[in-house]
Image (spheres, rainbow, N blue to C red):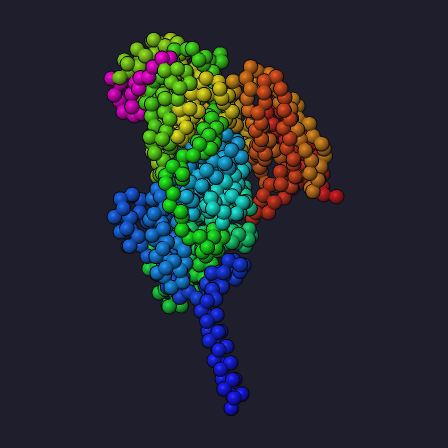
Amino acid sequence: MKRIKFLLLYLLLSTSALFATGIKTKPIYKDPSQPVEVRINDLLNRMTLQEKILQITQSSAGSNDVPQNRLEVAQKSNPQLGSFIYGNENAVLRNMIQKDAIEKTRLGIPVLFGCDIIHGYRTVYSIPLGIGCSWNTDLYRQACSVAARESRLSGVDWTFSPMIDVARDPRWGRIAEGYGEDPYTNARFAEAAVKGFQGDTLSAPYSIAACLKHYVAYGASEAGRDYVYAEVSDQTLWDTYLPPYEAGVKAGAASIMSSFNLISGVPGSANPYTLTEILRNQWKWDGLVVADYAAIDQLINQHVAANRKEASKLALESGVNLDMCDNCYPENLEALVNEGKLDVSTIDNAVKNILRLKFRLGLFESPYTKELPEKSRVMQQDGLNIVKNLAEETFVLLKNDKNLLPLQKDKKIALIGPLADEKGELLGCWSGHGHPEDVVSIFTGMKQEFGESNVVFAKGCEIDGNDSTHFGEALQAANRADVVVVCLGEHSWWTGESASRSDITLPSLQLHLLKTIENTGKPVVLLLANGRPLALEDVAPHCKAILEIWQPGIQAGVAVAQTLSGTNNPSGRLDVTFPRSVGQIPIYYDRRNPARTGEMGHYQDISSDPMYEFGYGLSYTQFTPSDITTSSVTVHEGQPFQVEINVTNNGQYDGKEVVQWFVSAKADKIARPIKELRFFDKQMIKKGEAKTFKCNIDPLRDLGFVDNKGHHFLTAGDYTISALGKNIQITVTPKP
Ligand code: BGC
């Protein structure tokens, strides 16, 4: 009897101990020591169909700072949604929504907060088109880290950036958001952005997830219009539009945004070939695909789906994981499953991808953002220095007759033009968290650099319109000065999304102002602040020097003034061709050679040459290149070799030189571009000194090409490698 009692007691105690342990044991998905894939599967197994569908739905949350509204937004938002677009300037609203997600939902899955941090959060730097001209990927990586830190501290985990759409049509407003016309350049800046945003690991306190967009061929939008058809052969897809994405994926990009455009008839957001075959099967990528804003619903406009239900099925099955703000998935997926038209495993795959990102970001462990005062979150001195240095490197000196620039510090300067004392316009498009009052205007920067009494400002006119009544004041200022700096260009909202323009010349009012100033006989320096290549054929003759400054961000005035004074020597080189007129578009450097050459095939009425070509840019100093040398003139696949060039600075200023290495194939099985950029490098060379620039060539990667299925090949034959106008011939022999 005693033994039985003892046994019963033992059983009772051990069951209750087990029970107690059971309660205390964390579910596997909450255990950070478990591998991510195990956590994902555990969580997925616990989710209802409805929870899964909400998880792959994104909505937007508040963008104003009125406290009651924040509360209202938080109360209205469904904390079971997988993600929000987060527009607020601090983390308060985020934390409210997050608290509901963690504490009030059954599984406590944290929300992912995304936002368009395109060129800086509050410490806004130059537009990406300008950044490509810096050819300084390391400095850009640092700027992206600054943006990541400010974003994460302000409640954003994920940026919809970088935009790496190769763009060859200046009429397209979104040309401002990418790194120009060349696939290789976009690829290198894609990597830099991914590394800058994501850091060494996504779970680090200041890392945010990057998003490569807009996948794919959005830059090929017909005639520079937005959201339209893009006619892209598989060959062009592979040799021009996909390489930046492949590089970004290899660099570890956490997410990709599917594009609005039709790719030869199949929308980017309902395209099984690009979204599944290439991304998942060929590149083995396990990140998150988010649809561009309302792109699923727009499949109806694009005439590939009859209604929202069909659109939802099409997008999800093609590979779009997260529905951005058009509510198609929550509205339709459950019914599609119940009707047997959609397999739950397709939803599961999409859910896994968003959960994976949340686990990698460490959101399950640290869902909240510390609420810090503004001054400890944004506009730190190290960030300001980085964006100032970056702005300087984006400037491209297009013209400098008789070395008018740099200007001596004791000169009397008349600073004229609608952008000369502007702030907001110099932030550029997509600068949502930027504050115009943070911008150092060019006038302010010039006074600091040249002395208050040496700089006189007169606006002269607005950016557009026909009011010339203030030309007189500008003339007076010019007449009293030794030199005139005229600052002209575009509104920031003339580029960016849905901002196409058929005319890429300077507004006639501004040209008129320039000509009026020129008539004073004073030497004129033209500063251009714009977001696209402009047609400058009628502008260039009316000034002695032109500095393209793009839209340089908050340190604009400091960077411009220090460049005009020679403290900085401009080192930007164009990442995009400047046409002479709209009639030349499309015009880009890596075109194919025509069948008839020489005098034939040109325009009858205008020159066929661009105004300023890709890679162009002057310096205050003089760089002299040596011939190119090579470690091998005859190579075969699998035999790497090196080419080198020495550059001597024999001018009067220290300066940075950019060396771009191009490859040309004499004959191949696919007609290839006249030349293709394969590597670039930028180094400071002090006056009187020389530097060696080296390029390591892997024959298959660098001399080879890609076919219309994505296979890389190398053909035996003759190749030319060129840099700084020098060439060297290389022969590829058949593989032994
Ligand atoms: C744009 C994207 C952007 C998204 C979210 C879309 O209209 O095309 O580039 O990331 O909106 O703001």
Residue 208 image offset from top left, x and y in percent: 46, 45
Residue 650 image offset from top left, x and y in percent: 60, 16
Compare residues 545 and 297 and report the one nearer the observer: 545
Q: Residue at x 48, y 28 (%)?
A: 389
Compare residues 712 and 623 and report the one nearer the observer: 623
- Residue 59 sits above or below residue 703 on the image: below
- Residue 39 sits above or below residue 511 on the image: below
Magenta span of residues: 453-469
Q: Main secondary structure of the magenta part?
A: loop
The answer to whether 395 appears left or right of 447 in the picture is: right
Q: Residue at x 63, y 24 (%)?
A: 691
Compare residues 233 and 461 and report the one nearer the observer: 461
- Residue 611 sits above or below residue 54 on the image: above
Q: State the residue lying farthest toward the bottom.
A: 1
Q: State the residue lying farthest toward the front.
A: 2
- In which image quadrant can residue 487 be found? top left
Residue 303 image offset from top left, x and y in percent: 36, 52
Q: Residue at x 41, y 15 (%)?
A: 450
The answer to whether 503 appears left or right of 734 in the picture is: left
Is 464 contained in the magenta span? yes
Residue 277 image offset from top left, x and y in percent: 52, 54
